Image: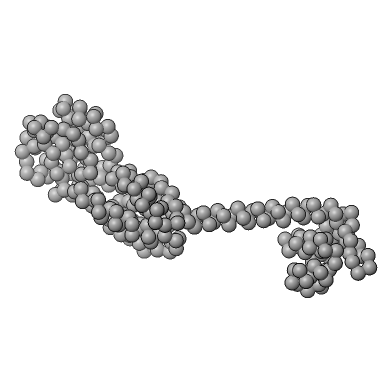
Amino acid sequence: MEIKQLKYFLEVAKREHLSDAALELDIAQSAISRQIQQLEDELQVKLFKRQGRNIRLTTAGKDFVIHATKLLNQVDETLTLFRQQESNNLYSINLGYEQGYVAERILPLIQTFERQYDSKIIPQQVSQDSTKQILVDALDVAITELTPTLQQNNDLNVTLLYEETYHLYLPKEEPLALAMNPHLAQFEGATIFTLTPLSTTMIALIEQLTKATLHVVTHPALAQYLLAQHRGFILAPDYQRLTVSSLDYKDISLSHTPLKRSICIVVRKENNKPDVQQLTSLIQTLFNRVSTYH
């Protein structure tokens, strides 16, 4: 049973004349007759009976009108639903971003973009490596750490966005507070609290260079308490600041050390969704304007 057979059947049932139905459907009368005959053979019933030049529905034909109408309505509803979903998907941009500075700028990015373009952004926080999600179009755009995996993938467009650097709070009584541009190795064995979860590459780098014990404390007040109690040092990305007195604590920049990571925009080269290019351009404009914190 084919959809076109149901359409031909209902048109003939409506007009009760093959030639009128053929004219309305813009198809040869013989083609309609052949399709209805195939339908009757499959159903094993007679749907029409001839009365002079006209044809009339049989009892089985009248019953089948109800079912054929329901079937075609279901087909139309299904087509409408999936076309609408495809349209919605076409004008929805899945944007992945990592926790951190990027997350703090997502809302103004979305607001600015959606005022200017028809597409809507669907934001989602992602883990460090978004390569697979980009390649299967689970994400259209990702703002993420630049990794060798991303750099080596020829199916992706990777654009460097900014470099994220760090700084360290420590009590002024600490000998390291007097050091100018200290090396990470000088913090060997220290207890370090971080104000934000670090990426796996940053954790590996710190552990390799300092052998320090790392703990995450995302609450600034707790970090300040630990600092005041001389429990350890506080490590934070440069966009995060503690409200501590400069008389008691030293804020040391680590931008001269290897402790930094590059943040980039990633898009699959074959992604042809409307407004994706406009979104990446806006991301570059917005982050270039506000990422001078380091």
Query: Which residue does the image show at 46% across and 54% down from the upper left?
Result: 92
Q: Residue furthest right?
A: 52
Q: Position of residue 48 (x, y in %)?
A: 88, 61
Locate residue 10 relative to residue 203 in the image: left or right: right
Query: Which residue does the image show at 55% across and 53% down from the upper left?
Result: 85
Query: Which residue does the image show at 16% across and 27% down from the upper left?
Result: 228
Locate residue 131 relative to residue 171 in the image: left or right: right
Q: Can the viewer see residue 115?
A: yes
Q: Residue furthest front?
A: 115
Q: How many marks?
A: 0
Colouring scheme applied when the structure was drawn: one colour
Query: Which residue does the image show at 33% across and 59% down from the upper left?
Result: 281
* The N terminus: image quadrant: bottom right
Locate residue 104 relative to residue 137 in the image: left or right: left
Q: Position of residue 78 (x, y in %)?
A: 64, 53
The one nearer the camera, 175 or 251, is 251
The one nearer the camera, 197 or 36, is 36
Q: Position of residue 153 (x, y in %)?
A: 36, 61
Q: Is residue 245 above or below residue 9?
A: above
The one nearer the camera, 135 or 115, is 115
Which image quarter: residue 16?
A: bottom right
Q: Is residue 128 above or below residue 284?
A: above
Q: Can the viewer see residue 199?
A: no
Q: Position of residue 171 (x, y in %)?
A: 11, 32
